[in-house]
Amino acid sequence: MKPTRPLNFVACKRPAIHQRRLIMAIISVLLAVSCSHGSGEPNVQINPQPKQIFHLFASIKNAPGPFDSVEATASYEVENWPCVPLAPVSGARNVPHHTLSLPVTRVGDVYQATFATDALIDGDYFGRGICHWHLTSAGVSIRHKNRKFDASVTPPSDGRETSTAPYFSIESYEDTAEALIDTGLRDRSELTQPDNAFQIQLNARKATP
């Protein structure tokens, strides 16, 4: 006689299936909430009348050859993190960042750009109070084929002049087979060939009224 299947066999499986579906549905909702509140960049508004204006000057010393382009950017971040909600799943705060491209002009051997520390308008993006932007860095990216040579500064709050002058290997300039962002070294002696190097001199100076 063929054994009979226990009557509760199907009843035991269905709750497990329904439970898994319910868990997946909850996770999907939480992920959607997380994406909508934490990871998206807010609708950033540009300040039409900035007051904290700086000029950026860049020059290349001992250039090993021509460069394809020179780009300048200013990067900002929300400084008061509590105005940003916690992501429901990870519990982390995805602090908004924003980068502005700066027009570059060339005067002789010097590349120039202008930026403002108060270029972005503060706003209540998440319903948790006003988010305040602050400048994290301003700098240049000088491209040669697949290589980008980057230098950046952060102007001090008191408005004084600030500068940096990293060294870059000429070997890095010549070896363009692999795409690479090279940020250089402050100490020339740390290069493999200290005498075979070029330098990006970067200076930020507050604009005079």
Image (tube, helix red, strand yellow):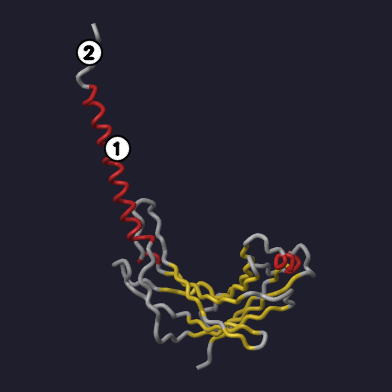
SS assignment at label 2: loop
Asked whether 173 or 186 is in front, the reply is: 173
Amino acid tagged 2: Thr
Q: Position of residue 6 (x, y in %)?
A: 22, 17
Q: Which residue is mark 1?
A: 20
Mark 2, residues whose alpha carbon is within 10 Å: few (<14), some, or many (≥20)? few
Q: Position of residue 126 (x, y in %)?
A: 31, 66
Q: Residue furthest left?
A: 7
x 24%, y 10%: residue: 3
Q: Residue furthest top?
A: 1
Q: Which label was assigned to residue 4?
A: 2
x 36%, y 51%: residue: 89
**Left or right: where 198 falls relative to 94:** right
User: How far apart in space, not on screen, are marks 1 and 2 (Cα)?
Assistant: 28 Å
x 76%, y 67%: residue: 189
Please tell me which of labels 1 and 2 falls first in the chain: 2
Q: Position of residue 88 (x, y in %)?
A: 33, 53
